Each structure stands twice: as structure tokens, then as C-alpha cells.
Amino acid sequence: MKNSKMRHYLPPKISGTCVKNIMLVGAGGTGSQILTDLARMNHALITLGYEGLNVVTIDPDRVSETNVGRQLYSMSDVGIHKAVVLTTRLNAFFGTAWKAFPAVLTKSAVIQKNEFDIIVTAVDNVKARKAAHRVAETANIPYWLDTGNMAKTGNVIFGNAGGFFSKQPTKKGCIERLPNAIDLYGDVLLSAANEAIQPPSCSMEASLTKQDLFINKAVSTFAMQILWNCIRKGYIEQHGVFINLDTMNVRPLDVNPETWKSMGWVKPNCRRKYAR
């Protein structure tokens, strides 16, 4: 039976062998896993003949005792900025020269245009997502990989940011724009009632009652698999996933306008701005 799945093909800047510039916002539970997985991916890509990844991580938080064990930090890291300590460690281990900025990403942040190819968010509040969305628009970042989770559930959505489209082959079933997290869940994400999705925990025990020990790793694994498919295959047929560790259920988000329509999003009829 012929494969009838729809596809989104990535532009050469993502699917080619050149360096991919990535901004990671958040180095906590999921972010620390993502940054470590990006370092592993970078090493694998270079081994396969690619130029690899260049990653800049932004996070204002310092390591606390409650982070040890659930996040990728040790007691000796307590008090140090998360982004700095983990980036320094990975640079030493893999020989990279990645950068870290211990700061809050704001909507008005001055980011050089066309500097990044993908923005990845691993944050736990609406304000940070809104800031990332705005930065992607103003800095011409064509793709946004967003991650989020509750206690035992998680979600990953990879979409075009900043109104970007991506030119597709002249084949049937090729989709030139993927909706992002704001497109699909804007009303929910921007609701004031959802501002504090993950309240802070004062102890490791309390923390584990609010987030399962392995939910962050599960979210990171699927997020990185989507990115890996983009680079290695040059196209994707699923651009997101919904995870439930309690029921052991994983539901993919297919590249399919009918699916998006059922979620309340229809491709805008506007002037095209194409990714490089």
C-alpha cells in the first residue's frame, strides 16, 4: 500500500551538512537533558561528516539542592548558574565551544537577525514562551521546537516560527508551514490561569510529586528525535508528540492540515516569508 502520509521538507540550512545554530532557552529539568542530548547529537553528526551544531543556552537560574538528582547537576554545582555549569562541563567533555548566558530572555532581547536556525524552549511558564515567540519573530528564526510537561505528561511541538514558510518539492502531500505551539495552543498558553504551570518545590521529595523522575528525559528524547529526523532524513511526517508516562501512551502529532484544523488552526492566507 502506497504511503499517503504528508511531509514537511526542511530547507538546506537544516537538512544540509552545514553548521546548525540553535538557541536553547531553559537549562532545568528538560533543558539540561536537551543540552546534553544536543552535545551527543553534535558528536554523532560530526562523525557522519556534518559540521555539527552550535548551541547557545540562556537561563537565569542557579542550581539548588532540590535540582540535584532530578536534573543533571551535582551537589558541587549548587549556587552556580545552570546554563554556565552544564555548558562548561559539556564543552570540556566533547571539545565544543558552546556559549551560555545566565540571563532572562525577554521579548525585547537584541538578537542578531538570521543568527539562529532553531529556537528550542524548555521553560515552565507562559511569559518565557511569549518572549521566545517574539524573539523568533524579530530575529528571523525560522523554526521553533517547544517542550513542556506536567507531572507525568509531556508534549513536544516543532513548527515554523515568525510567520515563516518552507519551500517544498513539487510533490503531492508536501506541507510548507508547520504550526507552532502558539498557533495550536495560543488560547491555553496565553491564559493567565495557566501562568504558573509548574510551581517551585522546596524539597526533592516535593519536587518528585509534581514531576515524575523520568518525564523530562522522555520529553527530551522525543524532541531530539524530531530534530534528528529533520537533519538526517531532510523531512518529517510527525512534528510533535504527546506523552503520558502513567498510561505508557505516546500519541504523535502528524503533519496533517485536517489534524490541525480539528485543533483550531488553519494555515493563514498571507504573504510568504520563506526559510533559508
Image: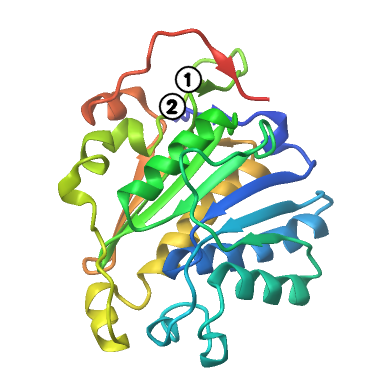
Residue 147 in percent (x, y) is at 41, 53
Pointers 1 and 2 in contact (C-beta within 8 Å) = yes
What secondary structure is found at the residue carrying circle 2? Answer: loop
Q: Quadrant of residue 181?
A: top left
Residue 177 in percent (x, y) is at 48, 23
Mark 2: give few (<14), some (14-19) or many (20+) Cα within 10 Å: few
Query: In the visual, does 166 lie left or right of 3?
Result: right
Identify residue for label 2.
Answer: 4
Residue 188 in percent (x, y) is at 21, 41
The alpha-carbon separation of the residues under discs 1 and 2 comes to 8 Å
Q: Quadrant of residue 142?
A: top right
Of residues 166 and 228, the one nearer the viewer is 166
Residue 51 in percent (x, y) is at 82, 49
Query: In the visual, does 19 lie left or right of 215?
Result: right
The residue at the point 40 percent across, 67 percent down is: 216
Q: Quadrant of the N terminus?
A: top left
- Sequence-wise, the earlier of marks 1 and 2 is 2
The residue at the point 64 percent across, 62 percent down is: 100
Query: In the visual, does 46 lie left or right of 183?
Result: right
Of residues 266 and 7, the one nearer the viewer is 266
What kind of colouring is applied to the model shown? Answer: rainbow
Vertical relation: 3 (above or below) 245: above
Query: In the visual, does 270 lie left or right of 208?
Result: right
Disc 1 vs disc 2: which is toward the camera? Answer: 1
Identify residue for label 1.
Answer: 173
